[in-house]
Amino acid sequence: MSNEQQTSGSQSQQERHQIQDAEIKRMLEHIKNKFLVMSGKGGVGKSSLAAYLAVSLAKRGKNVGLMDIDLHGPSIPRLLGLKESIRNISQSGKAEPIRFLPNLQVISIEVLMGEDKDLATIWRGPLKIGVIRQFISDIEWPELDYLIIDSPPGTGDEPLTIAQTIPDAKAVIVTTPQEISLADVRKSINFCRHVNMVILGIVENMSGLECPHCGKKIDLFSARGGEFMAKKENLPLLASLPIDPEFVQKGDAGNLAAFDGQERPFIQEFSKMVDKVIKLTTKEAPVPMEEKKERAVQTGDRIIFAVPVAGGKLSAHFGHCEQFALFETENGEIKGKSMHVPPPHEPGVLPRWLHEKGAHVIIAGGMGARAQQLFNENGIKVVIGATTDSPESLVHQYLSNTLVTGENICDH
């Protein structure tokens, strides 16, 4: 093959990829929240929790979709007792997911596996990536509040493909309390941070068993490991779910959607988790800073700026600064300034500290992606790439729309 032919083939493949990206975006743009349920290792109950989360959200009146992309062990159809295949094709030629409940629709990549569901799927990476992308682009979802995506364990091709194909998906990471599971989950956390995927929270599953005879809690798989890890990684702990044998039995029987009973500890904890998920995803949309500035001029609202300082100038990296200069502004003008020595630089400490100080905006030279995420989670707008100048000058420039920013000088 000539160089020209190779170049032409590469270009056409790239064009096809771009067309497919646009199609995927069109298919998913009317879905408000997308969750990738993942785990570092198998056997932690990830698929069961993904299925029951979808069912629980639907029972709360939310419009929900459930997508199973586990090529090697799709479990969702069996957990829900779903035996039908795709029947309906939309006017645009796309497949429509199967309606499981009035407001819950389900699709599994198992429909591509053929008649024998027990045959092993032996596919290499590039083929898996192509199949998953094609699968996502060929499903036409209705307007949804939530799309729950069940991924196979680990940090391989499937979750990576989702992270790259659906960049606004958030991760729900499932673990069990013992260290062998936590070690793999830490890899999942690092994976999410590496690909800039927001982590909604950690779910600790199999967190103890209540003895049916005496009612005493038995820690079969250690205790509170997921809780301690969530605190260490500065991530929300969504739930610590106890073992419930009936939950397992319902899943094995394909009747997981019928699992209920408010007196059960598992149901009580799971219900709290659903409350947290809804709360975390239905917060008021953040107001753009330009709009905030207009409101400040019109209503006299304050905006507090934080600027890391070293030697009287902007510190190149916020985590290595000597002090933070905090400026209180009103009607687009600086009304007050105070200097503060920051606490020791550890993950998550400075965003919380500045949030407690009332900061709305931080102007920095460089900042890693994880730090940016933490500031955003604390309601603080991040401006990076500012030049070395006095903090007063930078705030004046920002308020007058003359602040020039360059590249982020921090890449970790």
Image (tube, grey):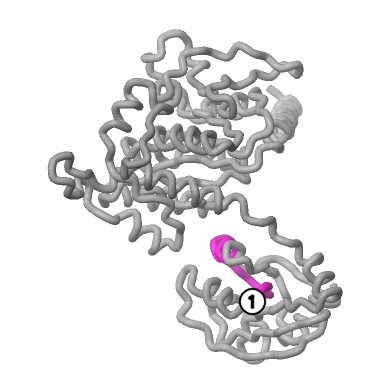
Q: Badge 1 is on which residue? A: 359
Q: Secondary structure at mark 1?
A: loop
**Residue 333 point in image, percent of width and height:** 81, 84
Along the line of sight, the residue nearer the viewer: 146 or 47: 146
Q: Is residue 371 above or below residue 97?
A: below
Instruction: Indicate the amino acid at tag 1.
Output: Ala
Relative to 251, 13 lies left or right: right
Residue name at image x 52 percent, y 16 percent? 112
Residue 205 falls in image quadrant: top left
Q: Is residue 132 above or below residue 373?
A: above
Along the line of sight, the residue nearer the viewer: 258 or 128: 258
Instruction: Report the magenta residues as a range.
Output: 359-374
* Residue furthest out toward the top: 115
**Residue 33 point in image, percent of width and height:** 61, 43
Q: Is residue 282 visible?
A: yes
Counting other residues with Cα less than 10 Å from the Cα at mark 1, is it few (<14), some (14-19), or many (20 or more)? many
Q: Is residue 412 visible?
A: no
Relative to 57, 289 lies left or right: right
Residue name at image x 72 percent, y 74 percent? 386
Q: How many marks?
A: 1
Relative to 350, 259 lies left or right: left
Residue name at image x 26 percent, y 33 percent? 245
Residue name at image x 58 percent, y 33 percent? 64
Asked if residue 38 lies in the magenta stretch, the reply is: no
Q: Is residue 13 above or below residue 336?
A: above
Residue 145 falls in image quadrant: top right
